[in-house]
Image: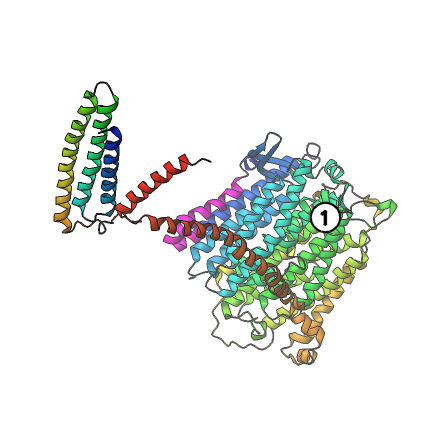
Amino acid sequence: MADLFLSYSYLVLLWPFLAFLIIGLWLGRYNRRAAGLLSVLFSGLSMVCGIGITYGYYRRVLARPHLFPDKTLLVNQFDWLNISPDLTVRMGIYLDPISVMMIVVITVIGFLVQIYSLGYMEGDEGFGRFFALLSFFAFSMLGLVVATNIFQMYVFWELVGVSSYVLISFWYHKPAAVTAGKKAFIITRFADAFFLLGIIMVGYFIGNFDFQDLNAPETAAILNKMFMVKGIGVNLLALSCLLIFAGGWGKSAMFPLHIWLPDAMEGPTPVSAIIHSATMVVAGVFLTARMFPLFAASALTLTIVQLVGAFTTLFAAVIALTQHDIKRILAYSTLSQLGYMMFSLGASQVVDNPTTAGINPLGYSASMFHIFTHAFYKCLLFLGAGAIIHTIHTNDIGRMGGLRKAMPKTYWSMLAACLAISGIFPFAGFWSKDEILLGAWQSGHYLTFGVGLLSSGITALYMFRLFFMVFHGQTTFGRQLKTEDPLMSFSIVILAIPTVVAGYFSKEIFSAYFSSPMVWAADKQLLPGHPLWLPVCANLLAVTGIIIAWYLYGRGDLSHVRLLTRRRGIGYQLVVNKLYIDELYLFVTHKIIFSYIAAPIKWFDRHIVDGAVNMVGRFLHICGTGIRLAQNGQLTVYLGATAIGIILLYVLGRLPI
Amino acid sequence: MTLQNCLILTLFLFAIGVYGVLTRRHLIGILLSIEIILNAANINFIAFARFTTADPTAGAIFPVFVMAVSACEMAVALAIIISMYRHRKNLDVRELEALHG
């Protein structure tokens, strides 16, 4: 039974793809209800396959550690592109702890989001299209996580990009949605160009795309050399790692490529939920984790991963404090949490200390653990926000309030999710965040550790600001609110279960199985142990944040807030306008790139390149017009010309030249 | 009477014919000019046959052929010209310029 699931493991991808084909090509136009149900059914089947694969993988691999020392299993592999006899690109299913974990997360969340969408998208014009695209999104992301080589991953990586683009601009009659979709696509494509460059570079030097070979220590040894570019020494290993990481940088929306993520909120809320929890944004973290053994060989790469992650964590948390759109707050909180995952990977490099040099496996497993727990509570938060928006038709938390009585199921589930994201004991977020902070502290990155700790306090503050403004305070809606949609609350309540317990029950699994790809693992005995003050301190900070939020926003009296923001100092203005980064981008693209680079190039293209081509055409045209004049249809002219020609030939032939 | 005299005569006839072909506006006039050109050629044949070869038979027979063929050609050309006249009520070659570019 277990082996059966493994030998047919490609079914987990095939179900959503079939749903996409059937609904997209045929069923979506004829019967919307049937299309939705079929999509839910197929994603349910995909989830069954995913859980079956997990079971099979456990029985075959994890239960027999002596046979599989690196815990990796390749199934259903076939040759895809035979580029040359030495270079073959394969496709297949790569099973190791992180990909199996991602399969579970994607299929479970995909299934719940699809059920939720049955309620949320009820009556929408593009009901069938929505489900087709949602299935395609799940398919692309599943293909990405099970990729056996970086080339296959890149193919699915771009599929994820394109399906996120069509889903973000799903309501294509809204200009804002179209702009947001384009923004997401262009920025991620920009980053992906570097990713492709990295792939080509690694493929050139290694001659192979398989992750197992790329992550082997020999690869790092081959790449680890300097070469000179115009007198500047460049380390090949660091360069290729950074190029590959650039793909994840854009996809996971790390600063300063984060600007597409808040705008992506223009899409339907179920799309935001799935983008932020299971697909798309975690792809960048996943890529970094997948290539981690190679990255770990380059200290520079890990330092950059860590700094970018830590900065994004704090930066996004601060911005989230001031936003008013419920989905934007959640988007910034996602950015912040993604920052945690990234810096945890980067901070697993133990700071210079001769006795404990190497990689701290805790950073890696904690990051994966955080992907896992974050997926559930972030999905729940978005689905809850969607339910609220669906009920009262506004995104502005300033206009919400007192929804506690009207939406009890959403209220309690959201409370659990807010506690989880704030890292309150014993909710899911506590365990993973605790491990991330512990990992950074153990490895000696005290600055990053401090940023993480501070951000967890800010996280609690902005999450409960949202929570209190939405659910507490004066109600402004009276009794005309409709009751909670049963399909939507079903998904929300189901997700509340892993939000509460996922951390506690899976903690052991993650620390036991998710440390395998460490090549230069530091000795665990030499690292500092787990101090009790760390979780206590983090929790105290979070509770402080909640109390401040309650004091400012919880009592239905916003006079203190007004007092705080009345003066609107420069700092507040900066934060509320997201540090003007969007404006900076616009300035750079429009004012500098468009007018000083694109416009001259356009002029050159229009006038020089096109002009040359046009001139050839015009010359021939003039010649043709001239010749046409001779062709006047007058028989006598032709004959005369012939006669004169003959005479000329005769005379010329006789000339004494 | 020498070969040279004959050649000068045919040269004039040929030139008159070419001039007629190039300047006549009427199709019938052009046809007549063509006839003159052909006759100039015929006289050339006979002159060369008479003055330069031992046996003048071949040179004398060839103009007969030419006359027969040109009679047929004239018949066809006249038929075409008549049908053209019925069709267009006009035989001025300057008007016949349907093939201009």
Residue at position x 78%, y 54% in the image: A440
Residue at position x 70%, y 78% in the image: A564
Q: Is A234 on the left or on the right of B81, as rendered?
A: right
Residue at position x 71%, y 71% in the image: A547
Quadrant in which the N terminus of chain A is drawn? top right
Q: Main secondary structure of the magenta part?
A: helix
- Give the camera-side residue of A625 and A247: A625
Which residue in the rendered view is the most extreme toward the top? B54
Q: Is residue A170 visible?
A: yes
Q: Is residue A416 visible?
A: no
A265 within the magenta span: no
* Parent chain of label 1: A
Residue at position x 59%, y 62% in the image: A594
A18 within the magenta span: yes
Label 1 SS? helix
Which residue in the rendered view is the most extreme toward the front? B1
Q: Position of residue A292 (x, y in %)?
A: 71, 45
Which residue in the rendered view is the most extreme toward the right? A354
Q: Position of residue A536 (x, y in %)?
A: 77, 61
Residue range highlighted in magenta = A9-37
Count all numbered tags in the image, as a single digit: 1
Quadrant hosting residue A437? bottom right
Find disc 1 in the rendering and name its residue: A364
- Give the camera-side residue of A256 and A100: A256
Q: Is B21 on the left or on the right of A131, as rendered?
A: left
The amino acid beneath tag 1 is Tyr
- Give the camera-side residue of A94 and A542: A94
Q: Position of residue A120 (x, y in %)?
A: 48, 61
Above or below — where is A413 with respect to A355? below
Q: Position of residue A57 (x, y in %)?
A: 62, 38
Q: Is A273 on the left or on the right of A561, as rendered?
A: left
Label 1 crowd bin: few (<14), some (14–19), many (20+), radius 10 Å: many
